[in-house]
């Protein structure tokens, strides 16, 4: 048995640990190369020390554990290359193997104190787009997304997201849609989905299962969820119906062109 390869086990445990623990999981998902390797080494070393300390305490306090571990070590000793160092190899094998197994349960227990929402917001604080989407979902406010083809969608972000996963699209339950005028960039809404399935919220849409009125009784509200490619979104903002209506009222009237006075013919 090559003892050097045994140290790969704590590395695996360290990678699992920092991929599950809310404090590090989103950073790890976006790291690669040497940064990810060093992070796995760091947490793997911590797991190795923690497991070795716990094993020492268990062996000294619980005879049944000491006897069980002794039996495991005896089964490992024949695999050692050097018979003189078989005891050390067996002890190291147990520690490394337990360090790998301890990664997930230890991170799971720590997550009870490291709440996901707080560390999620901290992880995305430098990404304005993701912070905006998370804020809209938490406040259950619709957003207005303008696409690069001038199409406009207003609706709720209905799917939670994990910054650990690359965002390629957003899922929107549309309330209405339309387009921006090519020259004035004003929005003209042409489709009103709420006429079909009424007013819904983010929380309500997740549980919406009531069939639509005839002749669309074979559909439910979720069937209208629209997938918007993130790289095609030109702009995005929160949308409030009352604010939109007030802005519509405050629009200045269109300027009236002055009357054109006919020019009298010039005598030749």
Image (spheres, rainbow, N blue to C red):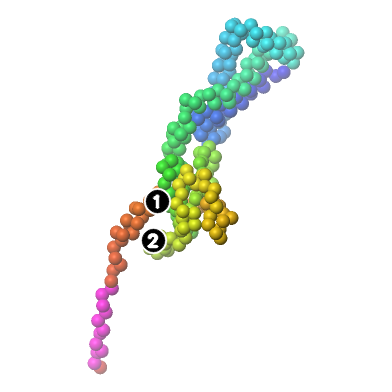
SS at badge 1: loop
Residue 98: % across, % down: 62, 19
Give the side of residue 24 with respect to residue 78, left or right: left
> Which quadrant is home to the N terminus?
top right
Q: Residue furthest bottom?
A: 268
Q: Nearer the viewer, mark 2 or mark 1?
A: 1
Image coordinates for residue 220, horizontal then vertical, percent = 55, 52
Please state if 112 lies on the left or on the right of 245 as rendered.
right
Return the residue at label 2. Answer: 186
The percent position of residue 99, horizontal first and vertical second, equals 60, 20
Q: Is residue 151 above or below residue 49?
A: below
The span picked out in magenta is: 257-267
Above or below, comparing residue 197 to residue 53 in the picture:
below
Residue tagged 1: 239
Q: Is residue 218 above or below residue 106?
A: below
Q: Nearer the viewer, residue 38 or 99?
A: 99
């Amino acid at each position: 048995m090559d003892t050097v390869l045994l140290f790969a086990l704590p590395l695996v445990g360290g990678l699992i640990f920092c991929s599950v623990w809310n404090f590090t999981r989103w950073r790890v998902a976006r790291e690669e190369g040497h940064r990810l390797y060093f992070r796995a080494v760091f947490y793997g070393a911590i797991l190795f020390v923690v497991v070795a300390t716990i094993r020492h305490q268990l062996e000294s306090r619980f005879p049944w554990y000491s006897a069980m571990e002794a039996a495991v070590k005896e089964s490992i000793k024949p695999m050692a290359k050097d018979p003189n160092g078989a005891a050390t190899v067996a002890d190291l094998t147990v520690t490394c193997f337990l360090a790998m197994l301890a990664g997930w349960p230890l991170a799971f227990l720590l997550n009870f104190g490291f709440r996901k929402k707080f560390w999620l917001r901290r992880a995305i604080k430098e990404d304005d787009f993701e912070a905006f989407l998370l804020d809209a979902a938490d406040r259950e406010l619709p957003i207005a997304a303008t696409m690069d083809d001038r199409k406009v969608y207003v609706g709720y972000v209905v799917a939670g997201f994990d910054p650990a996963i690359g965002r390629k699209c957003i899922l929107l339950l549309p309330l209405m849609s339309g387009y921006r005028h090519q020259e004035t960039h004003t929005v003209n809404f042409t489709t009103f989905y709420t006429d079909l399935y009424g007013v819904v919220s983010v929380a309500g849409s997740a549980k919406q299962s009531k069939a639509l009125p005839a002749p669309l009784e074979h559909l439910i509200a979720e069937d209208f969820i629209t997938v918007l490619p993130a790289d095609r979104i030109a702009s995005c903002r929160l949308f409030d119906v009352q604010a939109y209506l007030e802005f519509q009222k405050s629009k200045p009237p269109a300027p009236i062109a002055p009357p054109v006075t006919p020019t009298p013919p010039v005598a030749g």
